[in-house]
Amino acid sequence: MPRIDASALYALGSAALLALALILARLGLRARPVVAAAATSVPTATLLMWLAAPFALDPAAFDLTATLIFAACGVLFPIGQTLLSFETNRRMGPTLAGALGNVTPLFALGFAAVLLGEQVTRLRGAGAMVIILGVLSLTLPGGTLRRGWPLWVLALPVASALIRGITQPGVKAGLALWPNPFAASLIGYTISSAIILSLRATQRHLPVPWRDHAMFMLVGVCNAGAVMAMYAALARGAVGMVAPLVATYPLFTLAFSALILRDERLHARLLGGVAAIVAGVVLVLEG
């Protein structure tokens, strides 16, 4: 079963890189606006991909339909998810940003039921309830609301999860035509870079210290690595196995937060909420 083992390894690597990107972004967002941060991280990853393209792309395998699918997904992902994730991270912190953004499978389940006619099993229904309870445990009075963010901020990670829930099926369809995870990442990131640089050009440019640029360049590398690792896992293994492993990234966030951040306070309700969300995601995807 080497293919399954490789897929699991890629998926766990993706989860770890997603968590590390959240932690590093938290440090950088203390001094930079969200759009400026994204205008550094996304194009940096895109530039590195283009430098590697001559070695990672096979022109003979090019598929126009897949290219158009990847480009269409790039209008929303990674740029939309990056902006929403950065803003959520800035307001809530990386642990909550990771936990609340981890409801993507609920949207995927809904799209499957509406568009594909798939039935919602009891196990998946139970998983959805566990996720909802986990989110409530993070937001009820006496928990994380002491951090001072208003309830409307919950819309940010939900919108981020919705974007991922929309684009993941599209990327999967494109990979069926052109099974090259690097190509999917490169095309999507190129479109997203064009969008964020255009948006940045309309804003007033303020001097930015090199240290802040370097931080978000590193964030971009981590996010790009996470995306490519996830696509590589999907190209090698079943979604039902890959997605639950990628969904464990809030646990990596907790570990990195405890090691790197000093202002991230962990408590029983927070830990229990994150654990419930991850367990619910696993139930949804395994059902």
Image (spheres, rainbow, N blue to C red):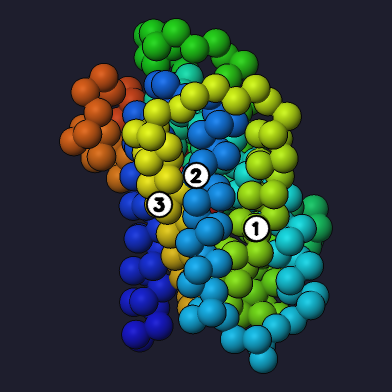
Q: Quadrant of the C terminus?
A: bottom right
Number of other residues with Cα within 10 Å of mark 1, as a class: few under 14, some 14 to 19, many 20 or more: many
Residue 273 horizontal side relative to residue 188, left or right: left
Circles 3 and 2, Cβ within 8 Å, touching? The answer is: no
Q: How many numbered marks appear?
A: 3
Q: x, y (%) of residue 278? A: 41, 44
Give 73 or 56, whichever is nearer the viewer. Answer: 56
In front: label 1 or label 3: 1
Residue 217 in which image quadrant: top left
Residue 18, disc: none
Spatial separation of the CA atoms under disc 2 and disc 1 = 12 Å
Among numbered discs 3 and 2, the one appearing first in the sequence: 2
Residue at which label 2 appears: 41
Residue at which label 3 appears: 222
Three-letter amino acid code at the position of disc 3: Cys
Label 2, secondary structure: give it. helix
Spatial separation of the CA atoms under disc 1 and disc 3 = 16 Å
Among numbered discs 1 and 3, the one appearing first in the sequence: 1
In front: label 3 or label 2: 2
Residue 212 in which image quadrant: top left
Spatial separation of the CA atoms under disc 3 and disc 2 = 9 Å
Q: x, y (%) of residue 255? A: 24, 40
Among numbered discs 2 and 1, the one appearing first in the sequence: 2
Q: x, y (%) of residue 246? A: 43, 56
Residue 33 horizontal side relative to residue 166, left or right: left
Number of other residues with Cα within 10 Å of mark 2, as a class: few under 14, some 14 to 19, many 20 or more: many
| Point 56% across, 50% down: residue | 43
Residue at which label 1 appears: 190
Q: x, y (%) of residue 13? A: 35, 60
| Point 51% across, 41% down: residue | 40
